[in-house]
Amino acid sequence: MTKPLLKEQQGTVRPLVAIKLLHTGVWAVFVACILAIPIAAWMRRFDGAAWLSLFVWIECAVLAINRGRCPFTDMAARYSHDQAPNFDIYLPVWLARYNKLVFGTLFVAGELLVLWRWLN
């Protein structure tokens, strides 16, 4: 059973839920792009692969500018003292913890497949 919220916590729930929903939605779009890159490469749709890649590279730049943190994480931190890896997004803890490793690896593999298919 969940604990009732203190009066000062009640005003932080809605913004945190909104940020988590938005963060999860944006994450899903980027994951879809990362998963679509090798499909586009396999189908020799290099124009589509290039646009998807550019979109993901822009996200990489945003993360780099923010020292590896998503801007939504900083926004969510204003409304929570929670330090769990998934406090700012609706993902399982293990996936939130290893998100960059898992999808970064898939992105690099997809980019290598694009290059391989393009050269052959």
Image (spheres, rainbow, N blue to C red):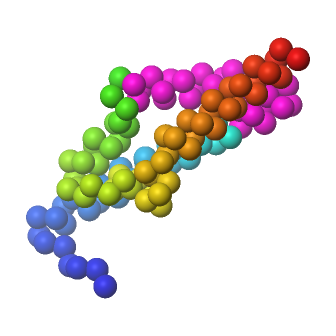
Q: Position of residue 63 (x, y in %)?
A: 41, 29
Question: Viewed as shown, does residue 36 lie left or right of 102?
Answer: right
Question: Viewed as shown, does residue 114 lie left or right of 59?
Answer: right
Question: Viewed as shown, does residue 81 lie left or right of 84?
Answer: left
Q: Position of residue 53 (x, y in %)?
A: 63, 25
Confirm whether the magenta stretch covers residue 3: no
Q: Which residues are magenta?
A: 36-64
Q: Is residue 18 visible?
A: no
Q: Position of residue 45 (x, y in %)?
A: 81, 25
Q: Quadrant of residue 80?
A: bottom left
Which residue is more in the foreground, 9 or 110? 110
Q: Which residue is pictured at 13% across the width and 72% down the height?
A: 6
Which residue is more in the foreground, 105 or 64? 105
Image height of 80 relative to 111, above or below? below
Q: Which residue is pictured at 16% across the width and 64% down the height?
A: 9
Image mark count: 0
Q: Quadrant of the N terminus?
A: bottom left
Magenta segment main secondary structure: helix
